[in-house]
Structure formats: C-alpha cells, structure tokens
Image (tube, rainbow, N blue to C red):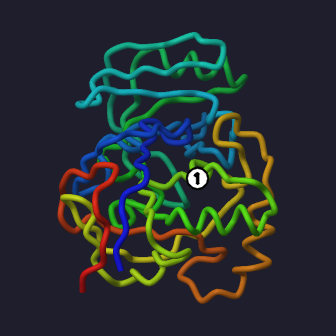
C-alpha cells in the first residue's frame, strides 16, 4: 500500500497559520523549524489555537537557522528582526513543564497589542518541545481521501486540510489507510517515520485555518461517525509518528509502509 506526498505544512510559530512548502527536512525531533517558536501567557502557559483562534490570521516565517523571525499581521504590518534569546525559563504545556527561552525583540509587544492581552514569544530549548507529543509525535500524516470523506460527511463541497494542522498529506490511498500504518515504519521520500498513534481531535479543527473563526462542526461529525472507533486518542483523524530516519521530503515523493 503506497501513495504520494500531496502537501507539506509547517508552522514556525505554534498556533499561527500553517505554511505550505514544496520541500522539508525531517529531523530527529520532527520537521525542521516546525513549531520552533511558541507563545505563552503571563502565567507561562502555552497559548495555541484552542485558546486564541485568531492566531491563524498571523503569518510567521523564519530563516533556515531560525536566526531571523518575521510575523505578518492582518493589517499588513510586518515585524521582523534577528532572534536573541534570554535565560532559560519553564512553560507549562499539556500539563507538563517544558524548558524555553524568551525571544528578545519586538514580537511579544506587537502580539500583546494586537491581542489585547499579554503574550510572550518563546523558543523551546529542545526543538521538539513545540510539538504537542514532543519527539515521539514529531510528524503527522493524513490522507487526502480522509479529508474528502469528512467533507462528504459534513455535507460541504470541500474542506481545507490545513484546519487539521498536519505535517504531511498523502494522496493515492483510501480514506483512513493511514490508520493501518500504526506500529509500522513508513517511508516518506528520503526519510522514514515510525507511526505511533492516532491524532485525537479538538476544537481547533472547527476553526477556519485563515481566520480562526469556528465555521465547521468537525467534532460533531467525528463523534457521530468515528466516536466508537478503537483508537489511541478519541475522535481520531490522522496519525502521529516519530522520525526513524531523517531525510528530505518533497511533494510528489512516494509514501509507503514497511515492516
């Protein structure tokens, strides 16, 4: 059972709009520069789309070494500068402490003004700590057919796959074929991924990936049609995995399961 890479997406700042790319490098912690920066509140708790959906209106870009960060706001204002880091601190993400360093520069003040609340831009000490499941879930995969299935189930013409915030889209396989890769190693271009579990869904998937406004009842559809599926996480849609062999992946590359 094999397919091809349909899309590749990263978000240099967790919670901000996904960026489609033609090529990315899978490293031991996950996709290069994916979720390389995170946002916390005044209590050092992680802020993402569940807490502030409007973050998807912001576009973040960084250079290959993450030495320069640019954030574009909805009004067209752009804040860009070289990244300087402060002393190591601790943030709380998913109930666990994670080591981070504050990003010194104009971004935190600009974000706070835009959001009307105090927000801080941080860089995880471990590049994998910006990802929900850390290194063991550094890459996520979702089939195009699964997205098409959801559109039909929701009685809409199409669904923008970016609302699921997945790293790799797979064309040429059946809906939910990715779930048959659980416990197996999947070759993806020049890399391979050891698939470890289902991606359980939350309210972020109800939000428009451009605006952050809730406009699709994805959770209702999944609860109705996939609520009883045997899975590692509830309301499964897509899978997560750990990078087994680092390498470069390009749109159009082959995706296939091994042992």
Question: What residue is shown at x 42% (from left), y 54% (from top)?
Answer: 6
How crowded pointer 1 is (Cα within 10 Å; few <14, some 14-19, many 20+) is rated as: some
Question: What residue is shown at x 55% (from left), y 61% (from top)?
Answer: 95
Question: What residue is shown at x 69% (from left), y 53% (from top)?
Answer: 158
* Spot occupied by residue 165 in the image (x, y as percentages of width and height): 54, 51
Q: Assign the C terminus to one quadrant of the image.
A: bottom left
Q: Kindly identify which residue carries mark 1.
A: 161
* Spot occupied by residue 195 in the image (x, y as percentages of width and height): 36, 75
Q: At numbered mark 1, what does the secondary structure look like: helix, strand or loop?
A: helix
Work out whether 228 lies above or below 85.
below
Would you say 107 lies left or right of 123 here?
right
Decide which of 218, 30 is in the foreground and name it.
Answer: 218
Q: Assign the N terminus to one quadrant of the image.
A: bottom left
Work out whether 163 lies above or below 217.
above
Would you say 230 lies left or right of 170 here?
right
Question: What residue is shown at x 81% (from left), y 68% (from top)?
Answer: 220
Decide which of 229, 50 is in the foreground and name it.
Answer: 229
* Spot occupied by residue 71 in the image (x, y as percentages of width and height): 49, 21
Q: Residue furthest top?
A: 77
* Spot occupied by residue 12 in the image (x, y as percentages of width and height): 42, 36
Q: How many marks?
A: 1
Decide which of 250, 199 is in the foreground and name it.
Answer: 250
Would you say 254 lies left or right of 139 here?
left
Would you say 184 lies left or right of 166 here?
left
Decide which of 255, 35 is in the foreground and name it.
Answer: 255
């Amino acid at each position: 059972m094999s397919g091809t890479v349909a899309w590749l997406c990263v978000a240099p700042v967790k919670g901000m709009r996904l960026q489609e790319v033609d090529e990315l490098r899978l490293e031991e912690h996950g996709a290069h520069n994916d979720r390389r920066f995170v946002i916390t509140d005044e209590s050092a708790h992680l802020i993402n789309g569940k807490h502030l959906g409007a973050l998807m209106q912001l576009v973040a870009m960084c250079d290959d070494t993450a030495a320069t960060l640019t954030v574009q706001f909805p009004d067209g204002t752009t804040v860009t500068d070289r990244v300087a880091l402060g002393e190591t601190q601790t943030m709380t993400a998913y109930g666990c402490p994670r080591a981070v360093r504050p990003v010194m520069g104009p971004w935190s003040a600009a974000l706070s003004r835009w959001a009307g609340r105090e927000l801080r831009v941080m860089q995880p000490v471990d590049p994998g700590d910006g990802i929900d499941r850390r290194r063991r879930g550094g890459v996520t995969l979702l089939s195009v057919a699964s997205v098409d299935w959801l559109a039909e189930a929701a009685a809409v013409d199409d669904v923008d796959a970016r609302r699921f915030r997945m790293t790799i889209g797979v064309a040429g396989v059946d809906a939910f074929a990715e779930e048959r890769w659980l416990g197996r190693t999947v070759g993806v271009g020049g890399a391979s991924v050891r698939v470890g579990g289902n991606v359980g869904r939350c309210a972020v998937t109800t939000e428009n990936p451009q605006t952050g406004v809730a406009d699709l009842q994805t959770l209702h559809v999944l609860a109705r049609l996939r609520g009883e599926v045997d899975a590692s996480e509830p309301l499964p849609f897509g899978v997560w995995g750990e990078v087994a062999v680092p390498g470069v992946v390009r749109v159009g590359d082959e995706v296939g399961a091994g042992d």
